[in-house]
Amino acid sequence: MQRSCGIFREKNTPENVQVVIDEAGRLTNLVNDMLDMSKLQAGVMEKNDTVYNLTESIESVLERYNKLKEQDGYCIHFEYDGKVQVKADEYKIYQVIYNLINNAINYTGKDKTVWVRQKISGDKVRIEVTDSGDGIAKEALPYVWDRYYKVDKTHKRAVMGTGLGLSIVKIYWNFIMPDTVW
């Protein structure tokens, strides 16, 4: 790898080009999330509910982490009773699940293990995302949903987060399920 004026130059391999494409998409999504958050808070966003397979959507989220699993040894388990169809805003649920998994990956323990569980109980579906990290101090719990709040400024994984992930989760979830108690 050559270094010139503070910029790393690598060959334009398909993998590197894909990383650039993925990051451009991620930044576009981040900007769209911020715009959506503003629309939600202003009360001008509409729900886009459709019937879709939630289990397959979660599997799609998990596919985004295949490289991380391959290269860095992360182990992400997905347990579910059966595939389930739901009527909801698929994009917002996808973002909620993605942000919860991403947060778990960032703060998991030395064993780099994350569990995602989909549990069906009657006509309800519960999604749990857990990691093997140290957890969050009780006094910090009320603040983890605030924009830009980070309990621990040092991630286990060398990724710079925006501090918006859990804030997006709360704002989207309150839009989807307004009677949720936090």
Image (cartoon, grey):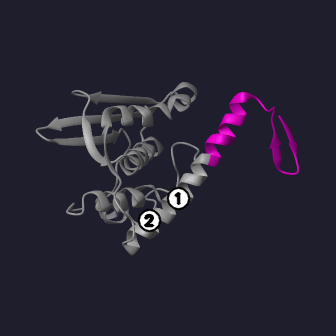
Q: Nearer the viewer, residue 155 or 40?
A: 40
Place of residue 169 in the rendered image (x, y in percent of width and height, measured from the top left)? 37, 56
Which quarter of the figure has residue 119?
top left
Left or right, 15 with respect to 8, comes to left
Q: Which image quarter holds the C terminus? A: bottom left
Residue 21 colored magenta?
yes
**What secondary structure is marked by label 1?**
helix
Q: Give the range drawn in magenta.
A: 1-24
Place of residue 31 in the rendered image (x, y in percent of width and height, measured from the top left)? 56, 60
* Number of other residues with Cα within 10 Å of mark 1, as a class: few under 14, some 14 to 19, many 20 or more: few
Give the label on residue 32, or none.
Answer: 1
Q: Which of 29 and 97 is in front in this view?
A: 29
Place of residue 100 in the rendered image (x, y in percent of width and height, measured from the top left)? 39, 47
Residue at point 28%, 35% (across, down): 117
Q: Which of 33 and 87 is in front in this view?
A: 87
Give the label on residue 89, or none.
Answer: none
Residue at point 24%, 33% (across, down): 84
Tell which residue pokes out farthest to the left in this image: 122
Place of residue 5 in the rendered image (x, y in percent of width and height, measured from the top left)? 88, 51
Give the residue type at disc 2.
Met
Which quarter of the figure has residue 40?
bottom left
Residue 45 colored magenta?
no
Distance from disc 1 to disc 2, alpha carbons, whole Å, reads 8 Å
Tell which residue pokes out farthest to the right in this image: 4
Residue at point 45%, 44% (across, down): 102
**Which residue does the numbered mark 2 point to in the structure image?**
37
Location of residue 164 with respect to 63 vertically, above or below: below
Give the residue type at disc 1.
Asn
Q: Which of marks 1 and 2 is nearer the N terminus?
A: 1
Left or right, 79 with respect to 19, comes to left
